[in-house]
Amino acid sequence: MIVNLITDQKEWTSNQLRKRVEKYNLQVQKPGDETLLARVNDAVLFNILPADYDLSGFEKYRNEQYLPRALEAGELGRVAAILNQHLSGLIEIQANLSIFKLTLAQISGDNALSEVVKDELAEDIPNPAYVTAQNNHTTALALLQSVSVADWQLVAQRYTGAVIDDYFELTLAVVNILPHIDLLEFYIESDTSMNVDKRRSLESNKQLIIDALTPVQETLEGLVE
């Protein structure tokens, strides 16, 4: 498949997709074949072929090689366009994860922005930078709350740069990137039999989940001669 939802780091342009589809066509077609087909088709259409012209080879190539491959390429292009749109959404999720973490630090971190500043009259007014950070934080969280379980799994694999086949490893990878307890609750309670205790902190819940999903390592002490 042209578009890889896990390893591709940016969207494909329409021109890039078109070139890859055409490259797929050229695995069967030789340079000039399509032009020759078009000329023969025109000649047939306008009835200007010589009476003794043998069309059997042309028709065999067109019907058994060219058209089937062209239809496959068309389907490849259609699916690639759909995947490319999905890729765009995954990239947006990652961007909003970054925005969420940045703005969280700006509004509640150790070096958070001041909520108020002095105006030219030395009076307290809302800090525009703080207000912007709050708005961006709220917007990012709203988008992240709309992410499906399947897309969280894809995003987690995108961060690792590889497919994660093991269910427990994939769950842990997702848990690791979730930045808000509501997101953790949605994912865990949608995809596992576990629950999130919202009386606990995000990190405390994460640790409980990690402990529950991480296999117990058997000690070999005393077993080695």
Image (cartoon, grey):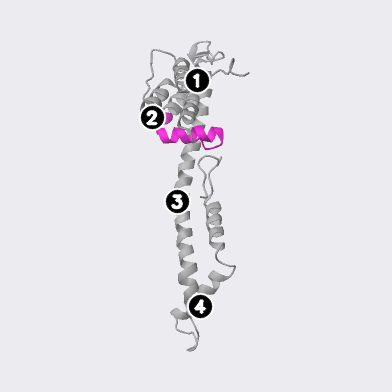
Q: Amino acid at mark 1?
A: Val
Asked which secondary structure carries label 4, the reply is: helix
Q: Earlier in the sequence, mark 3 or mark 1?
A: 3
Kindly report which numbered mark, 4 or 1, lies closer to the viewer in this rendering: 1
Whether 98 is drawn above or below 65: the answer is above
According to the image, label 1 marks what residue? Answer: 216
According to the image, label 3 marks what residue? Answer: 79
Query: Residue, x 48% and y 21% (percent of image)?
Result: 210
Whether 134 is drawn above or below 150: the answer is above
Q: Earlier in the sequence, mark 4 or mark 1?
A: 4
Alpha-carbon neighbours of circle 1 within 10 Å: few (<14), some, or many (≥20)? few
According to the image, label 4 marks what residue? Answer: 57
Q: Amino acid at mark 4?
A: Gly
**Is any atom of residue 33 visible in this view?**
yes
Q: Position of residue 77 (x, y in %)?
A: 48, 54
Asked whether the residues under the numbered discs 4 and 1 touch, taking CB atoms below 8 Å apart as contact, a structural biologist would say: no
Instruction: Look at the image and tell me in which quarter the C terminus lies.
Output: top right
Asked which secondary structure carries label 3, the reply is: helix
Q: Amino acid at mark 3?
A: Val
Inspect the magenta stretch and tell me whether residue 151 lies in it.
yes
Magenta range is 142-164
Kindly report which numbered mark, 4 or 3, lies closer to the viewer in this rendering: 4
Q: Earlier in the sequence, mark 4 or mark 3?
A: 4
Query: Residue, x 50% and y 37% (percent of image)?
Result: 91
CA–CA distance in space, label 4 to label 3: 32 Å
Whether 151 is drawn above or below 110: the answer is below
Kindly report which numbered mark, 2 or 1, lies closer to the viewer in this rendering: 1
Q: Earlier in the sequence, mark 2 or mark 1?
A: 2
Q: Which mark is residue 191?
A: 2
